[in-house]
Image: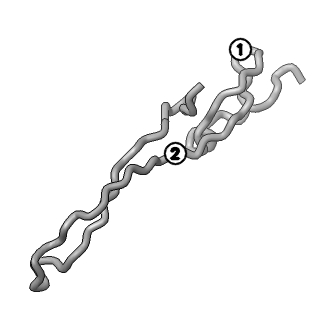
Amino acid sequence: MPRVCAITGKRTSSQTTSKRKGSPKKRGGVGLKQVGVHKRTFKPNLLKKTLWIEGKPQRVWISAKALRSLDPSLLVNPNK
């Protein structure tokens, strides 16, 4: 099961970063040369929480942002 927020749909995303070497032309150099490219991942802040949906407990991944905006009554057992 991939780590995806059940409410907002946030998921792991990837991006490339690059290293540059040299002195920029603006400062009198010959320009910046790209010497390395690396792939990195951005992971969302996900928490596994038990939500009460239609009177039944369900464990789902929820992002921290979605948890702050969530109705607090979904986190407690309605039968107690």
Q: Is residue 29 above or below residue 76?
A: below
Whether residue 40 sits left or right of residue 68 in the image: it is left
**Element carrying mark 1:** loop
For badge 1, the amino acid type reads: Glu
Q: Is residue 35 above or below residue 10?
A: below
Residues 57 and 61: in front is: 61
**Residue 73: quadrant of the picture:** top right
Q: Is residue 60 above or below residue 11?
A: above
Horizontal and vertical percent for residue 27?
13, 84
Query: Which residue appears at 18% of the width and 71% of the height?
Result: 32
**Element carrying mark 2:** loop
In three-dimensional space, the C-alpha distance between marks 2 and 1, rounded to whole angstroms, equals 30 Å
Query: Mark 2 or 1 closer to N-term?
Result: 2
Give the residue furthest to the right. 80
Query: Which residue appears at 69% of the width and 35% of the height?
Result: 48
Quadrant of image for the C terminus:
top right
Horizontal and vertical percent for residue 30?
10, 77
Q: Which label number is shown at residue 28?
A: none
Horizontal and vertical percent for residue 76?
79, 30
Residues 13 and 50: in front is: 13
Q: Which label number is shown at residue 43?
A: 2
Quadrant of image for the N terminus:
top right
For badge 2, the amino acid type reads: Lys
**Residue 64: quadrant of the picture:** top right
Circle 1 crowding by C-alpha within 10 Å: few under 14, some 14–19, many from 20: few
For marks 2 and 1, give the one nearer the viewer.
Answer: 2
Whether residue 28 sits left or right of residue 42 in the image: it is left
Residue of label 1: 54
Give the residue furthest to the bottom. 28
Horizontal and vertical percent for residue 18?
30, 60
Q: Is residue 66 above or below residue 26?
A: above
